[in-house]
Structure formats: structure tokens, C-alpha cells
Image (cartoon, grey):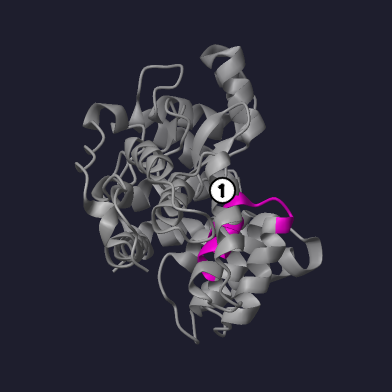
Amino acid sequence: MSANSRYTLLVAALVGVLCPACGESVELEAPHTAGHAASTVLNDAPNGVCRVGAQMVDHVGCVDEELAFSAAALDACRSTGEVECDARCRSGDSASCTALALVHQFALEATPNATYAAHLLEKACAGKDGAACNDLGVLHAKGLGFPVEVERAETLYAVACEHGSLAGCANLVSSRAWGSEPPANVAYAASVIENACMSASDPQACAALGTMRARGSAVQRDEKLGASLLERACRLGDVGGCERLGRAYLAGDGVDADDVTALQLFRRGCDRARSDACTDLAAMYCMGRGVPRDPPRSAALFRQACDAGDPAACRARACTGRASL
């Protein structure tokens, strides 16, 4: 079972078991397919919340958090147009090639062309652009323009990591539970992430390392250390790290359980358009954990997250009646 599946079941359990009264109203409708078509990596969050697995990037919109492209390059590519972006790519600017690939893959400012997008990423990856190698891996992993090929994705993540992409290192380590004796390239990726967090205080690396420690993926499992690393990532500005830290406080994993702190962290993530954080926040309002019960607020948050494509939120119901913890 994937981590996302386990998380979906956890939220469903929180809402259905800890708060049985949350299921007394009419079930929310699932989001319309048309609103979540091929552009499963980029969209503009029309309802103010990004889809599951995406994060809000300033001046760009909702972006798959597994991608490693240059936000500045994509912003410039969308602002100046395809022709100028293509000229920069042809002149050897690999970041523009990677950005242009996303423009074509997801029809941002151009006619969708998955084949050309893959060509651009392969070209940039061959030029040792780690971000391009990583993003090509994401397309293979998610079956966007390709059949789903997890092993091919992992190979590309490893190459991306070798070329300096922290996202590539993180995606390689998190692609499966590697255990205490991972392959050499996975061990290398884990060491890169650890060094980037401990030596350079990179927020993305600290969030990845915290998750690795909590799961015991390619490193020794240590939930307390994992929580402290997530706290560090959150303090450094990684919103995903804040949201994961909130779950640790909610469950008491590596920290003393603290509903109020969990609520604050979920609220921070929801304010930054993370749909999973909005779902968690909705459950807190429904159950009255860390905050007085507020069924209307809970229902609004569930609907907002459901519209953004969070299946856990779509399966939840508007929160009415009396909560039972």
C-alpha cells in the first residue's frame, strides 16, 4: 500500500471513527473529471487549494512537489511566451528547456505535446541537468505521456541525484521502503539529503530527512529525530514539513501529542493551499480537537479539499451533530 493510500485511510478513520457524527449530512460530490484532466501536475488552484501532492509556488501556481524545475525559469517562460523560452532553450539554457517541457506537457501557454516535452527533458537531462532528469522521472513514475515505469523513474532519480538535484535524491529514497541495507545509489542519495540538511540547513532536505527517519527508509528509524527534523524544516519555511509535523503531533509520533500545535500546523499548510492540510484541518474542526467544534467550518474545508481532488475529503461528510471522541 502506498504512503498516500495509508494517509487516505488514516484521515477516513479519524473522521469516521473518532467523529461518527461527522457523517450525518449529505455526502460531498467528487470533483468533476474535467477539472483534473491531464494537468495533474500544474493548475492554478481555482478554488484556492492545490490538488493532493502539489504545493503553491509564488507567481506560478500549484506545482507537483516532486518536481525540481526552476520556478523562476517557468515563471519567465510563461511570462515571455513559448517562442522566447524556446530560443533560450536552444541557446543552451537547460532550465528553460525544463520549463518549456512543462509548458508543452500541461498546455500552459502552448498546444499540449507530451512527445516534445519528453524530448526537451531528455535533451536537458543528457546535458547533466539534474532537474530535467528528475522531472522526466516524475513523468515515468506517474504515467504522464508514458506507461508507468517505476524502475525507469528510479533510474532517472538516481541520475538526477548524481547531477545535484535534491528532489531527485529525495524521490529516489521515498520511491519505496528500502530497508536498512539500501542499494549504493540510494545510500548515496540519503547521505546527500542528510548533508544538505545538517550542513546547509536546506528546508527541502530537512523535510525529506525527517520523513526518512520517521519511516526508516534507507536510514535507521528514529521517530523522535524524524519529528525534530520536520520541526527544523518547518521553521526554515518548508510547508510540507509543517504539515507532516502536524500529523506527528496529532498522533504523538516522536513528540508528545498536542492537538493545538497540530491544528496550528494544519492551518498554516491550508493557508498555503495544501489540500491535505485542509482535510486534516477540517477533521480537527469536526472532532473539536485543538479547537471548539465548528461543523460549518469543517464542511467548508472538506468541500474545498474535495474540489481540489483529495479523495479523503470527498469521502468525508459535512460535520453535524455532536462529536464523540
Q: Is residue 9 left or right of residue 74?
A: left
- Main SS, magenta region, reads helix
Q: Any magenta on residue 80?
A: no
Q: Secondary structure at mark 1?
A: helix
Tell me which residue sits at (39%, 53%) in the image: 286
State whether residue 214 is above or below residue 46: below
Q: Locate the C terminus by quadrant.
A: bottom left
Tell me which residue sits at (35%, 42%) in the image: 299
State whether residue 90 is above or below residue 281: above
Q: Which residues are magenta?
A: 235-248
Instruction: Give how far across and how far down residue 234 sits, in percent.
Output: 67, 57
State whether residue 36 is above or below residue 180: above
State whether residue 268 is above or below residue 234: above
Looking at the rendering, which quadrant does residue 11 occupy? bottom left
Q: Is residue 277 left or right of residue 271?
A: left
Q: Any magenta on residue 236?
A: yes
Residue 136 seen in the figure: yes
Tell me which residue sits at (58%, 28%) in the image: 74
- Identify which residue, 154 or 274, lies in the foreground: 274
Amino acid type at circle 1 is Arg
Looking at the rendering, which quadrant does residue 288 occupy? bottom left
Q: Is residue 317 left or right of residue 188?
A: left
Q: Locate the N terminus by quadrant.
A: bottom left
- Identify which residue, 222 or 325, lies in the foreground: 325
Within 10 angstroms of label 1, few (less than 14), some, or many (20 or more) residues? many
- Identify which residue, 107 or 209, lies in the foreground: 209
Instruction: Give how far across and how far down residue 5 sits, in percent.
Output: 31, 62
Residue underneath mark 1: 267
Instruction: Give how far across and how far down residue 300 sits, in percent.
Output: 39, 37
